[in-house]
Amino acid sequence: MTMKTLLFPTAPASDDPDMKYWVASVALWPITGVITGTPPLIAKLTAGQRKKRAEATELRIQQEALTAKATADAEDAFQRKLEAELDADKRAAMVEARETARLTARQVKLEQAKVTRKAKRSKLGDSAGAAALLLIVGGPLVWSLARPWIPTVAAVAAAAWWLVALMHAPTPATMAAAAAAAAKRDRQADPEESEESDPDQDEPNVDQGDDDHADKDDSAPAPQPLTHAELATTIEQMVAIRATRDGGAGNLLLSEALAALQHIGHYQGSDTREFGAAVRAANMPPAPSVGVVIGDKRKTSTGWSVSYLRGLLGRAPSLPPRPAVDHTPAQAA
């Protein structure tokens, strides 16, 4: 590849009507080439750091999923143990001991975070002090020695960056191909994905068309509206139940929660915007972006997850209590 092909746009034929445009492009290429070539160059230089951050984020998500699953398993085991205990006093003592352990673990975690922040501040202060001392003591000496070389080094660095940016600048053909590929992806994309940018927009009811729900008896009494506490508990239990099925993530969309409640008669006639206002009033605001897999497609919208509720509630979401089991012996007939 010659330097002309590498740095400048490809020249058209001499009788091409775009010849004047090519001449203007070549004249402006020292400027436009640097502008268009700088983003790819920066992306290439920072590719390693972005890859490491992505790997760290993926690892953190996996750790949170494992922690949520372990918490759900421990909660289930505790509920079974609690049901097996016949003495009411012992059951109350077990619940109190468990809450005490949770509070203690929370306090220990807060103390550890406080110690970590203090250590970071101390280290930052030491580094800043050392840098200030070095600047005060060695700054004048370094400046006197490096001052004659600063213009030369700056000029060489600017020239090197200019040359490398021109080498990474996309050609018109490459830019046209990228634009065509982006347009093709947009045409093939599901149109419903673009409609999910609004957090509280109206979303289709997943239970719409359910014959059993549509044909319910009109004579049945209408369900009582949920209080704020009941709505918050319901959302928490929905997330905990979902966590037992999706590997501990517990991702639940706002539209799914609304559809489930509408199926049993609550919030009839409400849309996701009105239901979003209701859950916010119940101190259970949804996260702006939660993803679930429905069929073979991934859907992202507002909702809740185990990790989000852990930060919101200060604990993992709890499963609904199991039905009480009668352990009394049967009387002889």
Image (spheres, rainbow, N blue to C red):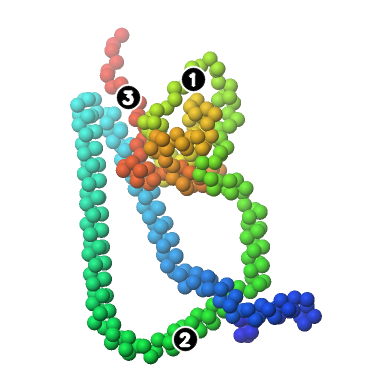
Q: Position of residue 103 (x, y in %)?
A: 23, 42
What amino acid is at disc 3?
Answer: Ala
Q: Secondary structure at mark 1?
A: loop
User: Relative to 221, is 181 above or below?
Assistant: below
Q: Position of residue 194 (x, y in %)?
A: 59, 49
Q: Is residue 143 left or right of residue 93?
A: right
Q: Position of residue 133 (x, y in %)?
A: 23, 77
Q: Residue furthest top?
A: 333
Q: Residues within 10 Å of mark 2 (few under 14, many from 20)?
A: few
- Toward the viewer: 35 or 203? 35
For label 2, the residue is 156
User: Which residue is found at the position 35% from the left and 26% from the top?
Assistant: 323
Q: How many numbered marks are there?
A: 3
Cα distance in 3D space between marks 1 and 2: 79 Å
Q: Position of residue 311 (x, y in %)?
A: 34, 46
What amino acid is at disc 1?
Answer: Ala
